[in-house]
Image: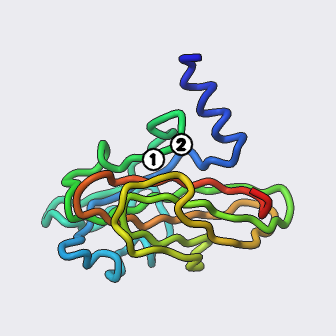
Amino acid sequence: SGDAKAAQERLRASGWVMGWHVTGPFENAGESGHAAVYAPETEEFHREQTFEGKVPLEPIGWRHRPGSDSARGYVSLDELLSPNVHVTGYATTWVRVPSRTKATLHVGTGGAYKLWIDGAYVGGGGEYRNPNSLQDGHNVTLDSGWHRVLVKLGVEEGLWGFFLRVSDRRG
């Protein structure tokens, strides 16, 4: 019962996406970050990339985040990225499916978000709220193999993080 590694493995086995690269913060004053297009949305991922973010003359890059913050699968950006008020950040990872799959991406966020798979926009939401694990669902069809997932997440104040789980259409 206090085994964090075992809890992480149970989450993975249930479709919770763990192990992310995160970058930010980018500007989100007046909730402007949701509509703004920042480099992580348009450039291919490279671990060594740097971007110009919210703080001038302080380049930001991708930081690896191996798991989640809890036994519930929540991925917090608060602890890794600063400042964490009136900001936008990104998280990216890869998921593998063994065969063509009709899937649902279950998303819960603490702010406005957008979601892409392999560069194709899947969906999003503009609400600023407290996150829970099953706020939104987006249906996708994934071919067999690896797929890049990109999450854009804004926050004004409060919890800056998200949940993401992949399941078949039955849940």
Say which of 4 and 51 sits in front: 4
Amino acid under label 1?
Val
Residue 45 coordinates in the image, percent (x, y): 49, 64
Amino acid under label 2?
Gly
Quadrant in which residue 167 is drawn = bottom right
Quadrant in which residue 139 is drawn = bottom right
Considering only vertical position in the picture, is 32 above or below 52?
below
Label 1 to label 2: alpha-carbon separation? 6 Å
| Circle 1 Cα neighbour tier, 10 Å, few/some/many (<14 / 14–19 / ≥20) | many
Asked whether the beta carbons under mark 1 and mark 2 sit within 8 Å of each other, the answer is: yes
Say which of 168 and 18 sits in front: 168
Which residue lies at the image location 59% right of the left edge and 33% below the top edge?
8
**Quadrant of the rendering where the N terminus is positioned:** top right
Q: Which residue is mark 2?
A: 73
Q: Which mark is residue 75?
A: 1
Q: Which mark is residue 157?
A: none
Q: Is residue 3 left or right of residue 38?
A: right
Say which of 118 and 128 sits in front: 128
**Element type at mark 1:** strand
Q: Is residue 69 left or right of residue 56?
A: right
